[in-house]
Image (cartoon, coloured by chain):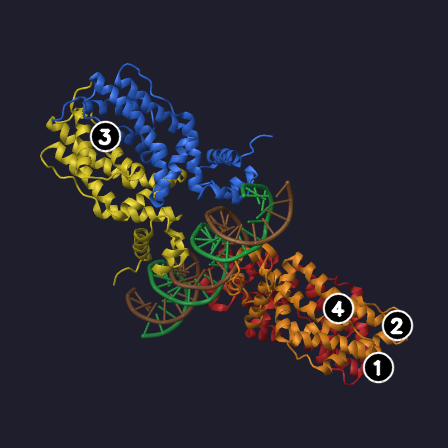
Chain colours: A blue, B yellow, C orange, D red, E brown, F green
DNA sequence: AACTAACCGAGACGGTACGTCCGGTCTTATT
DNA sequence: AATAAGACCGGACGTACCGTCTCGGTTAGTT
C-alpha cells in the first residue's frame, strides 16, 4: 500500500506531465486526472499551477544538490560548478521547467521569492564556498564575492538557455569560467 | 488623417495594455475591445497574443535602434551599449514584455525565431561594430567576436532582470563591462 | 428557497428568450448571461441550442398534457383534440419554437428522435384512445388507426402553421375533422 | 466562353452545396469560393443565404412545373398531382432545401411571401384546374375549392417530410387522396 | 479613340456567436 | 478531518460566417 501521502503522487505526476508537455501543457486538471487525486487536494497544497511546477522543480533540485568538493584549484571547482548547472539545464526536464516559469516570476512575487530562496540561494551558497577557498589559496582576488560572480557565471548560461538558444557546450562553460577568472584574478585597473 | 491602418491602433493598444497589466494580463479580446477593432482583424495579422506582444516589442525597438557612435575608446562604447540595454529593460514596459515573452520562446519556435532575428540580431550587429573598432584600435584581442561577447555582456543583465531580480545599476554595468574587457584584453593563458 | 438546480433557471430563461426573439434569436450566450449561469453549465446538459429549445418545448408540453376525456361522441373528441393543438400552436411561443426547430430536425437525427418521442408520440397516444373508443362505439371503421390519422388530422394544421401561413381557425379545425371522419366512417370503396 | 451571367454559376453552385451539405451547410462564402464569384456579387442579387436557397429551389421548380393533363377521372389526376409532389420532395435535394427553409419562413416575411407566391401558388393553380374539371365531371362537390384542398392533400405529405419522418410511399399518397375524395364527394351532413 | 459608368474579383473589416479549455471555488458523500 | 468526485462561475480562446465596405481592373457604351 504505497504513497499514503497524495503529495508524492501529485509531484510525481507533475514531473511526468512537465517532461511530456512542458509547463505550457501542464494543467492542474491533468495532474488530478492522472494522479487519481481531486483538484481540491492539489489546491489545498499549492496556490497555483506555477507554484506546483516550482515545487516539482525544487523536488528535483533537492535530490541533486551536491556539496562542492575541494578539487585543488579554483578553476576546476568553478568549471565543475558551471558544468553541473549546464548538465541539469540541458536535461530537457529542468530546462523546460525553468524556462516555463521565468515569465511567471514577474507577475507572482511569492513565486519569485520561493524560487530565489529554494533554487538560486543554494547555488550562491555553493559558489561562496568555492570563492572563499579560492581567496584562501590566493587564486582569487580578496574582494571576489558570490553576488556579482553569480551574474557573471550563470548569466551567460541562462542567456543561452532562455534567449539565444545557443548550445550549452563544455567549451562555452570554459570560456565563461576563464573570462570570469581573468577579471577575478587581475587587480582592478 | 492618421491610422487608416488598424495595425497602428492595435499595436498602440497592445502597448498600453502591456504597460498596465503585463503580458499576463494581455488578452486579444481586450485589445480588440479597446482599440475598436474586431478580434478577427487581430488574428488575421498575428498568430497569437505572444506574437502580438512581440510585434509591439519590435515596434518599440525599431524606434529606439541607434547607430553606435565612435566614442574614442572601446570601454566607453561597450558601456554605452550595455547601459542602453539596461535603460530600455528598466523602463517597466520593455522589461515586462521581454520577461513575459521568455517562457513562450520555449514552446513556440516561430516566435523564438522572430525574437532572435528582430531583437537579438540587431544587438549583435551593433556589438560587432564596436568590437571591430576595438580590434583596429588594438584595445581588444583580435579573436574577440560578438558571439561569445553577447553571452558575457548581456547574460548578466538578463540574469538579473529575469531571475535574480537584483537591480540594474550603472555600477553593475561597469563591472560587467570591465570583467569582459579583462578577458578580452589579456592574452589567453 | 427555490431553484437550487440551475436547469430550472436555464429553461425558464430559454422560454423567455424564445418568446421575445424566437428560435433565431436564441443564443446560448444570451441564456447564460440572463440566467446567471455559465455557458459550460448549459453545454453540460444540452448539446446545442436546438436541444435546449426542444427541452424548453417539452417542458411546456409536460405541463399541458391532458387526458382526453370521454365526451360522448368521436367527432367532439377529435375536435377537442385538434383544437387543443390549434390553441397551443397559436400561442405565439409554442408555435414559434416548433417553427424554429423544424429545419433542425433534418440535420440532427438525435434531435429528431427526441422530438418524435417526446412530442409527437404523446399526441399519437391520445389519438389512439379516441379512435379506440370510436371503434367501440361503432362510430369509426374498425381499421382506423392513429398512424395515418395523425397525418390526416395534424398534417393540415402544421401545413398552415409552417408553410401557407393561413390562419388556424375553429372552422378550419372542423373541416379537417369532418373530412377525416368522412373517410373513417365510410366503408372503403 | 460560357456563362457570361454569374447568376447561373451562383445558382448551380448553390444547388451543388445544398445537395452535399443541406441548407445548414450552405454558406455564402462557400458559394462564392466554389463558383469563383465575389461575395459582393451574391449579395447584390440576393438578400440572404435563405433568399439564395429559395431562388435555387424556384429554379428547380421552374424546370419541373407541368401542366396537369386530363387523365379522365379526378382520382387519377389528384393522385398524379400528389405523387409528383412526393417524388420531388423525395429527391433528397428538394426535400432538404424545403426542410431547411421552413424555419426561416417564420422570421423572414419577405422570404415567406416569395415562397408562397413562387412555390405554393403554382401548386394551388394546378389543383384548381383538377378540381374544376372534377366539378364539371360531377365527380366532386361543387363547393370543393383549392384552398382547403391544399391543406388536406399536401398537409399530410409535408407532415411526414417535416415532422414525423415517416416514408412517403405511393400507398400513403393513395390513402390521402381517397380520404380527401371521401369528403369531397359526400354531401355535407 | 478616348471617356465614362457599371460591374466585377478580391478580400479586409466590425461584429456575433460558437463550442472548448481551464482556472480556481464550492458542495456533497465517503471513509 | 481529510478526501475523491465533480458541478459550478468565469474568462478567454481561436474559428466560422455574416453582411458591409473599399479597392483596382475589365468591359461596354457613349461621345
Task: Identify the residue shown where x is 35% and y is 40%.
Answer: A112
SS for callout 3: helix
Q: Is the same chain shared between marks 4 and 3?
A: no
**Do labels 4 and 3 touch, CB within 8 Å?**
no
Mark 3, residues whose alpha carbon is within 10 Å: few (<14), some, or many (≥20)? Answer: some
Q: CA distance from mark 1 to mark 2?
A: 21 Å
Q: Is the same chain shared between marks 2 and 4?
A: yes
* Residue C147 position in % (x across, y down): 79, 66
Mark 1, residues whose alpha carbon is within 10 Å: few (<14), some, or many (≥20)? Answer: some
Residue pointed to by mark 1: D186
Mark 2, residues whose alpha carbon is within 10 Å: few (<14), some, or many (≥20)? Answer: some
* Residue C21 position in % (x across, y down): 54, 71
Residue pointed to by mark 4: C123
Q: CA distance from mark 2 to mark 3?
A: 102 Å
Q: Quadrant of the N terminus of chain B?
A: bottom left
* Residue C26 position in % (x across, y down): 55, 66
Residue pointed to by mark 2: C135
Q: Quadrant of residue D86?
A: bottom right
Amino acid at each position: 500500500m504505497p504513497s499514503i501521502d497524495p503529495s508524492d503522487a501529485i509531484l510525481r505526476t507533475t514531473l511526468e506531465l512537465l517532461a511530456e508537455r512542458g509547463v505550457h501543457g501542464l494543467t492542474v486538471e491533468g495532474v488530478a486526472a492522472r494522479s487519481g487525486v481531486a483538484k481540491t487536494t492539489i489546491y489545498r497544497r499549492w496556490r497555483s499551477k506555477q507554484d506546483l511546477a516550482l515545487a516539482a522543480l525544487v523536488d528535483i533540485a533537492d535530490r541533486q544538490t551536491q556539496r562542492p568538493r575541494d578539487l585543488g584549484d579554483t578553476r576546476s571547482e568553478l568549471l565543475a560548478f558551471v558544468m553541473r548547472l549546464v548538465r541539469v539545464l540541458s536535461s530537457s526536464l529542468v530546462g523546460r521547467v525553468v524556462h516555463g516559469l521565468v515569465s511567471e516570476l514577474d507577475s507572482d512575487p511569492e513565486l519569485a521569492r520561493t524560487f530565489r530562496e529554494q533554487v538560486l540561494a543554494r547555488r550562491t551558497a555553493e559558489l561562496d564556498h568555492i570563492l572563499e577557498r579560492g581567496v584562501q589559496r590566493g587564486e582569487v582576488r580578496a574582494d571576489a564575492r558570490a553576488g556579482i560572480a553569480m551574474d557573471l557565471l550563470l548569466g551567460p548560461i541562462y542567456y543561452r538557455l532562455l534567449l539565444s538558444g545557443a548550445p550549452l557546450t563544455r567549451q562555452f562553460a570554459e570560456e565563461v569560467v576563464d573570462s570570469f577568472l581573468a577579471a577575478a584574478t587581475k587587480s582592478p585597473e
